[in-house]
Image (cartoon, rainbow, N blue to C red):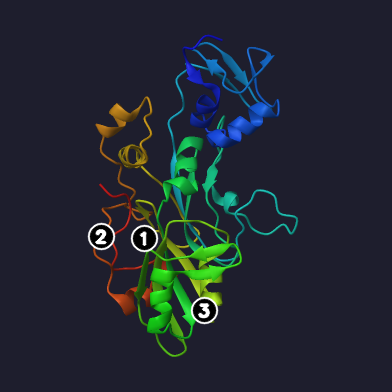
Amino acid sequence: MNEQGEKLQKVLAQAGFGSRRTMEEWIAAGRVSVNGEPATLGMRVVEGDLVKTERRTIRVGEREQAIRVLLYHKPEGEIVSRDDPEKRASVFDKLPKLRGQKWIAVGRLDFNTSGLLIFTTSGELANHLMHPRFEVEREYAVRVQGNMTEAQMEQALSQGVELEDGPVKFEKLEDHGGEGFNHWYRVMLKEGRNRVVRRTFDALGLPVSRLMRVRFGIINLPPRLKRGMVAELGEGEIAQVLDWAGIVSDGDESQQNQSAPNLDDRAKPAKIERRPAPAAKAARSAGRAGSRKSKTGVKR
């Protein structure tokens, strides 16, 4: 093809098939065709080209469906997978059905971990949120058995805690108090290694008894979004997220000129509070609906 047009993997990612890296793998594996011919790496497509994968077909240049973003307050006891041999409850069971698109889970939460889980129809947005090179912040409320010493807190923030797959350092670590044997902390890091928060505290001799994600990037867990509930971001809020991620979509201008719809009691996203919530009370309420003192939603 000529040098005009968009790279095929970018078009597929923007259409919600997956990340650009995944699309490159699909192309290399022969899972994509353009106008009836096998696609090749580096290929560009132009308006009118017919792109086909194993599950979907798109016509380049046709008006794309608007990007959608869902926030889900995951409870413990659900798996972040569509296929589970044990037939456990899945987070995908409660999501609205789509036609011609699919929900992409932004990262994972363990079976016994609760809190904010983001879903989107945009593979490019999902890739930006998850890829290590973007260093997107993840913040958690953590309840452990025991108390961290000052030396342990300094280690976790400065030197790092050594794990089997490399050291990990928290970007932020706050003592949020507690009662009895259990103690709450608020931690923030910029990576999503498997069970990294649990493993870090385990390495310090402090088993995690409760773990809840309260923020991912500029999106906080809305205070009124109860466990097991779903809320969809409005067009204005999605435009803010795309702008923050540096993603340009055809509908950006129109989205930015519209105000976000009222989500009522489901979840009314608001500006992220710059100062952390008061410690102990916020931590004690984390299991019910996240920090009551923290304002949540999309940063403006």
Relative depth, front residue between 39 and 14: 39
Q: Which mark is residue 224?
A: 1
Who's the residue at 55% across and 63% down the image? 166
Instruction: Point out the image quarter for the N terminus.
Output: top right
- The answer to which quarter of the image holds residue 88 is bottom right
Task: Provide the secondary structure element on which disc 2 rests.
Answer: loop
**Any part of residue 122 in sight:** no
Disc 1 on helix, strand or loop? loop
First in sequence: mark 3 vs mark 2:
3
Q: Is residue 253 above or below residue 159?
A: above
Question: At 43% from the left edge and 82% from the top edge, which residue is drawn?
Answer: 148
Q: Disc 1 or disc 2, which is closer to the eye?
A: 2
User: Label 2 crowding class (10 Å Cα cut-off): few <14, some 14-19, many 20+?
Assistant: some
Residue 250 visible in the displayed image: yes
Amino acid carrying label 3: it is Leu
Q: Which sits earlier in the primary sequence, circle 1 or circle 2? A: 1
* Residue 278 place in picture, x, y as percent: 27, 74
Give the distance between the C-alpha atoms of the residues marked 1 and 2, in whole angstroms: 16 Å
Q: Is residue 125 left or right of residue 248?
A: right
Q: Along the polypeptide, which appears first: circle 1 or circle 3?
A: 3
Q: Which residue is mark 3?
A: 204
Q: Nearer the viewer, mark 1 or mark 3?
A: 3
What is the crowding at mark 1: few (fewer than 14 residues within 10 Å), some, or many (at least 20)?
Answer: some
Q: Crowdedness of circle 3 by 10 Å Cα count: few (<14), some, many (20+)? A: some
Q: Quadrant of residue 267?
A: bottom left
Q: Is residue 55 left or right of residue 60?
A: right
Q: Position of residue 220 (x, y in %)?
A: 36, 56
Residue at x 32%, y 30% (from the top left corner) = 252
